[in-house]
Amino acid sequence: MTLRYSSGRSSSDLSKSSFSEESDINASTILNRISINSDIAAGPLTDNVFDVEDSNNDELNHDGRVIFKRNNTNMDDLTADTENNPDSDSDENYYEDIDIGGVFEEIRQTYGEDLSETLSAYSRSASKEIDIHDIEESIDHLPEGTHPEENDKSCANCCKPRRVENVSWLKEGQHIRLPGARLTFSFRRKLVPVYYHHAIVKRVNKTFENSIELVLVNFSKVKKKITINEETVTYDLENDEIDIMDYEHPRYDPKTVVQRAESMVPKETETEGNKTFGSYNVFCCNCEHFASWCVVGEGESFQAKGVLKSSAEILCKAAGTGCKIGRFIKRFLNKATTKITAGFNFGKYIPGMFLGATAIIYLIYTVAMTIAYRVKLSKGKLCKVCFKREVIALWTNFGAFCITSGISYLVVHFLLPLLTPTPVGIPLFLVLVLLSLFLQWGIGKLVKALRSPYACDKIEVKHLSQITPGSMISFKYFRIPHFAIVTEKHVESAESKIGTITCVHYGLKGLNVFGTREVIEESFELDVNDNIKNVKLVDCRQLKTFPPDDIVKRVRARIGEKTWKPFSNRSDHLCFDTIVIEGNDGDSHSARSKMIGKSSSKHKSSFYVGKKEIHLRSDLHIGHIVKYKGHVGIVVRLEDVTEGGEQNFKMDMIVHWDSWVIRKRFSVDLKNERLLIMKYNPAHCCPMDDRVQRARQIEGELSEFRTGKDFLENCILKKL
């Protein structure tokens, strides 16, 4: 919301002053000092502009207070004017008071919950009259607000690649990635890229079926030099794999992303490339740096970081392993002959010194990276969730290195010398080395598997009005971080800080921490002033979610489920699976032209995309390829059960079994069993109805296919 007035200052000067979340104190000063006439009927605020007329006007002089008039112009500005406007037509304007409730409701929705706490103070009667100079002074002290197209927080670490299954998903301003044009290999109908190329979509020109013509801004080679350029490229999903990089915290909107990308394209007069962004460098300024800079304002390349990080970890692991091998060789030589080991008296200290030096270097690296992440967090370039994730991963890996290397060093020094003469010595040593490498490699995988599917911030609950049915909350459950979906809330009034919250989550019936976990619905009393459970609201606004009523229905349908898994189906998975809408990004583009170029890719895109566990009948459709009770086949029939809800139904599958194509019938109970959907590239697949028809045509026959995989490919692949 921007204040403009005609008192010797241009509107462009005042447009620089806007409200932000940090300016509620100054905003309250202005709102408290402007008195609203209550004798005139209130009018709605939406789609109108209000001007302050000269208080000398008899029609507007109501006890000397500032009165607003409404005319039919744009709502982008709130105009305060103290002089008569000679160009205005008084017959076309009518004067009335503002609907003050509507004003503050719009401010609350636009600028967050912080202003709502002082809403009653804003709407009280003015204690003193003001003139236009007081308003000017207050406006001059307003801090410059954030532009609507720019967020004050961004993060590139929590972006995720999403495979494009339909060309309609590609839109202007997206950050996309593709397998590198040179070092990409195809192995068993799967593309294996050595690296990825990144670009910004400037415009979608044409689409037809699985083909699309895009205008990209990216690093490309022109006249034997790699610079940022615009190029028009045609892709076909049958040959090209395209991933959309979904940012949970982008700083800029799509239009601004395109503008930033265009601003880096060198002008014709620039012969040295763009000096603002920098010359191409594979480690410091590559295509991924450029694309992420356009979206979040900070150049990040996780490919380059991954190479450097992997190299450092390999060196650390090799250092520890090298010390063990060196120590073992020395022990072996000591047992062999005294002459050969005569020069090894000083050498016995080398492995320990080398291992100690490696640990110190690793510690310095860990501390430096922690400080760097902290700085990025303070500057709003990293979200809190990703900061915690990165710091935990850093120190966990360092701890794993210290523990495994320390134990191995002690074993090699004290235990192995006793076992070297025996046949057990060498095998034990090899097992020790492999176990050490496995632990250092596996600890990172374990930490990653324990992360939540999405990086959502947690908001402190200050009043119960923040929590509504369909909200996701976090709290301590047996002193362990836990998540739940709120289904009901019972409070005495909107301003109450004590109430009863009903939620659905993966809980325990009883006090046995090691008992079977089950999706249950239970209530607990929440006192905001004495928040024993440390309840916080999980901010999912950046995600594409179901409506609150649908969220409640979906999560209640899973009550009684007992398929908890520590790495794939925890309480946070339950919540996000219930809330987040996955898949299609919008309606398909119309086939505007059949005259579209061909893809330059030399390979076919991957046939198999992945698998997804489903928990509700509504997420399963006839024609899906599913894995259930050891069988993989095509769903040809679904029947709802009268009692059992969304997790109990009957299903018919056509499968390849013992050289026959047969129909299997199941009574599915998703409360106790797992069902996986196998996802394949739609560009290679025929429609659902066609694959069902093909399966039914060969049902009951002796199979001509050697494996079930051949049977499925015959049913779902397009016929050439």
Image (cartoon, rainbow, N blue to C red):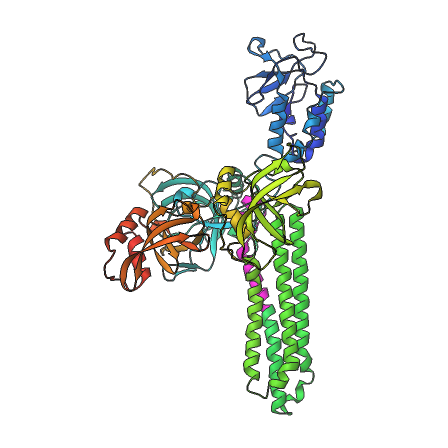
Where does the image place residue 248, in percent across and percent down from the top left?
54, 45
Please tell me in which quadrant of the rendered image residue 352 appears.
bottom right
- Give the quadrant of the N terminus: top right
The percent coordinates of residue 582 (x first, y second) are 46, 45
Q: Return the residue nearer the eye: 420 or 650.
A: 650
- Residue at 56%, 58% in the rendered image: 515
Tell me the residue at 62%/37% (across/down): 466
Q: Is residue 120 left or right of residue 645?
A: right
Q: In the image, 518: left or right of 211?
A: right
Residue 425's spot in the image, x, y percent? 57, 84
Q: Could one spot residue 87 in this view of the protein?
A: no
Q: Is residue 137 above or below residue 367?
A: above
Of residues 277 and 468, the one drawn nearer to the viewer in this rendering: 468
Mainly helix, strand or loop, the magenta region? helix
Image point (33%, 49%), residue name: 623
Pick the residue in front: 345 or 279: 345
Q: How many numbered marks, from 0 up?
A: 0
Question: Would residue 201 be visible to someone looking at this image?
Answer: yes
307 in magenta:
yes
Which span of residues is magenta-colored? 291-315
Between 556 and 607, which is closer to the camera in this rendering? 556
Asked if the magenta segment contains residue 615, the reply would be no
Residue at the right extreme of this rendering: 128
Which of the 4 image quadrants contains residue 169? Answer: top left
Q: Residue at x 27, y 59 (%)?
A: 661
Left or right of 90? Residue 639 is: left
The percent coordinates of residue 607 (x first, y second) are: 37, 55
